[in-house]
Amino acid sequence: MEVAAIRAAALVFVIVGPVGWLLFFVLFHRAPAQDLMVFHTAGRLAVAQDWAQLRDGPAFTDLLNRTHAAWLGAPLVLHPWVYPPPGLLLAALIGSVNFVAAYVVFVGTSVAVLGWCLWRWWAGNGARRLWLVLVALCPATAFCVGSGQLSFLIAAALLWALMLLPAQEFAAGCLLGLLLLKPQFGLMVPVALLAGRYWRAMAGAAATAGLLILLSFAFGMQPWRDWARLMFAHDPAFAAWMETGRHFGQSVDTVARLLGASGHVATLAQVLAIVLAAACVWRAFARPLDVQRRGVVLLCAAVLAAPHVGNYDAVLLGIAAVTTLARGIERRLAPWTAAVAAAAWLGSLINPPALIEMLGVPLLTAASLATPLVTAGLMVSALL
């Protein structure tokens, strides 16, 4: 793919990108930073040792609606606290200041850290300012800013760790251990480290995870008991939230269910997606491969394997797509690769499938349901 064609694709992104930000204002103006509200409230409850409200999903949601009423145009539906107890460490920091300050500091810091990582990620590329702009314009970026999610930090941890490997293995592993805060996106990390025989990185990841777990015991054993009960016992409120979250996500499991598959078949489809993602990650890290190709594979695999994926998490796909175009400056890309990268970048505009389906536009619905295929295609293209 010639440089002119890459610039043409970038121009399309520059034109379409603002649509994602417009959707951000439409979708979040009645409930801005709703996910950060969860962290903010959970942190205050943890410091107060109020475990009864923290573990009770409906009661927790009622508290969210009362304490953040000034920011909500309508009451939030069920929003329970479901993160593992180490997440309370971050929540306590967020809850230590008022909500506005928490939002400004958290989002501002997340953007700055990811921006710094991306600046280094494309070091030596003469068009890296353009690539940064394209990531900023990505619809998933708007949704992440609007919800106040952790996706920027997850992406930064993955990229920074990849840049440190193999010269600073232990430090890279320490960064990867931070994915314990959102563990569904860390499923492929052990596969990558085992394939590359990065033993010191594995030790670093274990050290960070172990430290986070140890520090979480500062809140006592009750959060762990409650979390284990939530995960492994039947809690009706949690089951309802899981069903809602699954329905309005964009994982392989979600797509299979929307296509009419039973719960068992959808679970099998998700398992097969995990196997495919693991096979690609193993191949990428078991042989010599440049860091950016490995990055595209790992970012896509993290999304494909995750059993729950939101629009904001697609920022990982946005970065993978822009990285694919950036590599096209140095080597020709097949037209289909560029098309798949563009589809991945634009994906958040036509997701989640359950919402798009309600519009009654068959072409949009089909495109939305194809998101896992696009993710897999972009992942495989980096290996070719």
Image (tube, rainbow, N blue to C red):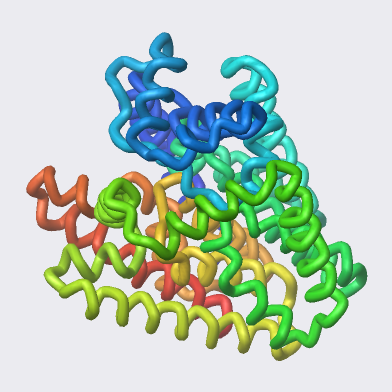
In x, y percent, where is residue 122?
74, 55
Quadrant in which the C terminus is drawn: bottom right
Q: Residue 129 at x, y = what percent?
A: 69, 42
Establish if 303 lies above or below 280: above
Position of residue 29 in the picture relative to residue 382 (left or right): left
Q: Between residues 325 and 275, which one lies in front from this camera angle?
A: 275
Q: Which image quadrant for residue 214?
A: bottom right
Q: In this view, does 63 lie above or below 39?
A: above
Counting from the top left corner in percent of width and height, residue 296 is at 59, 68
Residue at 53% across, 40% down: 149
Farthest-out residue, top: 70
Q: In this view, does 199 lie to the left or right of 111?
A: right
What residue sits 23% from the left and 80% below the top? Answer: 265
Residue in the foreground of this view, choosing between 52 and 83:
52
The number of numbered badges drawn on the structure is 0
Which residue reaches farthest left?
A: 360
- Residue at image position (64%, 43%) is 132
Can residue 248 be seen?
Answer: no
In this orientation, which residue lies closer to the viewer: 167 or 70?
70
Give the residue at x 33% y 63%. 371
Q: Is 293 on the left-hand or right-hand side of 291? A: left
| Position of residue 369 in the picture relative to residue 250 (left or right) | left
142 lies above or below 155: above
Residue 178 higher or lower than 336, as above or below? above
The answer to whether residue 78 of the structure is visible from this angle is yes
Q: In which quarter of the image is residue 283?
A: bottom right
